[in-house]
Amino acid sequence: MFKISSLNSLSVILKIGVGLVTSKLLAVFVGPSGMALVGNLRNFMTSLESISTLGFQNGIVKYVTECDNDKSELQKIIATVFISLMIVAIGLSGILFFFAAYWNNQIFGTYFNYSFVFKVLALALPWYAVSLFFVSVVNGLGRFKKVIWITIFGNIIGLLVSLILIWNYQTLGALLATVVSPALLFFVGFYFVNKEIPFLNTIRLHYFDFKIIKNLSSYSLMALVSSVIGPLVYLAIRKNVIATVGIDQAGYWETMNRISSYYMLFASTILSVYFLPKLASAKSNGETKTVFWSYYKSILPLFIVGLFLIYVLRFFIVELLFSKEFLPVASMFFWQLTGDILKVAFLILGYQFFAKKLTLAFIIFEIASLAVLYFLSDFLIHFFGIQGILIAQFLDNLIYLLVLAVYFRKSLF
């Protein structure tokens, strides 16, 4: 288990390292208010990423893997997906560019004018969408080391761009770095893809096949629900936080989310690399139960010990990664960490939806969970301030864990 998960360790550690350096830059140069605005833009970018790629990424990996030895079918898949993504990305770019002021008001509010950021995003989006497509193709071809190298180069490029832009333009630079850095990954991805297949010769209109779009559409539904609706709900919650308790409090919450995202990478990586294939290959409830409980006996206890250490060191961590201005974040650790323990406990159950392609059940549970989170947040913030958002996350994760435990009870117990 650990041998397999370690394949991704270099990429994960580098990603965390880059994230920590970027977080320190944001803390020093833009402060809590700038952190909140970057958080809003990141949530918007996550939704935009899924829409621009039509949620096809997992499906691309699957079909490219199956057609690795069938050159004709592989050409059809690559040409069909590329042409589809370009049409969607260019259409979205037009909407972003010509309605930049509208998007600025929706994402940042009327008190901030960063319309220029959305015009830059409009120009960068097609490059970004194609770079994600390249990564999926290389992954599907089984060139795992090359996927890691693309990620490594992408993180290094992102760090350099962030350093230059934040240093020179503070909050505007942080926002521009968020939209520009991912697009630059195009050049790295193109280099690696072109070494595997003659990419430019493969993109021909006569290779376009609607059947491929139809087959991929079933794989995109789950990705679009979690990657589009989820970030939009978090964006709505953050806007409510800004309106209710102020932008600095929203910045502290975004800071806590950043810290959480770093340690959650370890859990999500081992789940996708090791446990998802195990669940997908399980043929009976007994085999699935063995996979579930191997996770609960090995990964979950280690994760709890790690989070306990993080809680003990919370003041040191906040000062090290950010600055003294962010010390109020230390008061958020208890509810965030306990909620994340519950999240790690239900993630293995949630992966069963993907392993067994339980699309409808996943969509229902995901939308219900997000609805619970939104309404609990809206209610509890009036009683507990920013802590109410963290308590809402904890309660939502607890409910989701109990519901999934009941739903998968035959496989679990």
Image (cartoon, rainbow, N blue to C red):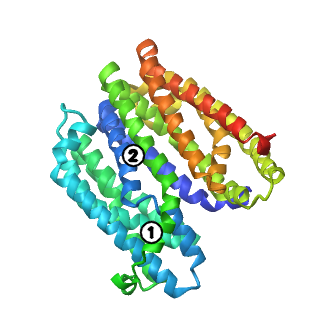
Position above or below: 55 against 200? above
Q: Residues within 10 Å of mark 1 (few under 14, many from 20)?
A: some
Q: For the residues carrying marks 1 and 2, which lies nearer the camera in this image?
A: 1
Q: Quadrant of residue 298?
A: top right
Tell me the amino acid under the disc marked 2. Thr
Q: Secondary structure at mark 2?
A: helix
Question: Hey, which residue is sitting farthest top in the picture?
Answer: 383
Query: Looking at the image, which residue is at 79% across and 43% down?
Result: 410
Q: Amino acid at mark 1?
A: Ile
Q: Quadrant of the C terminus?
A: top right
Kindly identify which numbered label has been placed on residue 213.
1
Q: Using the rendered view, name the quadrant where residue 307 is placed.
A: top right
Q: Position of residue 392 (x, y in %)?
A: 51, 25
Mark closer to the chain start, 1 or 2: 2
Task: Provide residue 127's location: percent of width, then percent of height.
Answer: 32, 65
Q: Which residue is more in the foreground, 29 or 225?
A: 225
Residue 176 location (% of width, % of height): 26, 50
Query: Which residue is depicted at the point 74% across and 61% down?
Result: 281
Where 214 falls versus 346 (above or below)?
A: below
CA gap, disc 1 to disc 2? 38 Å
Report the residue that reaches farthest toward the right: 286
Is residue 163 at least partly visible in the picture? no
Residue located at (59% from left, 34% from top): 340
Q: Residue 63: image x %, image y %? A: 55, 72
Label 2 Cα neighbours within 10 Å, binned few <14 / some 14-19 / many ≥20: many
* Residue that numbered label 2 is attached to: 22
Q: Is residue 412 visible?
A: yes
Residue pictured at 78% horizontal, 45% vertical: 411
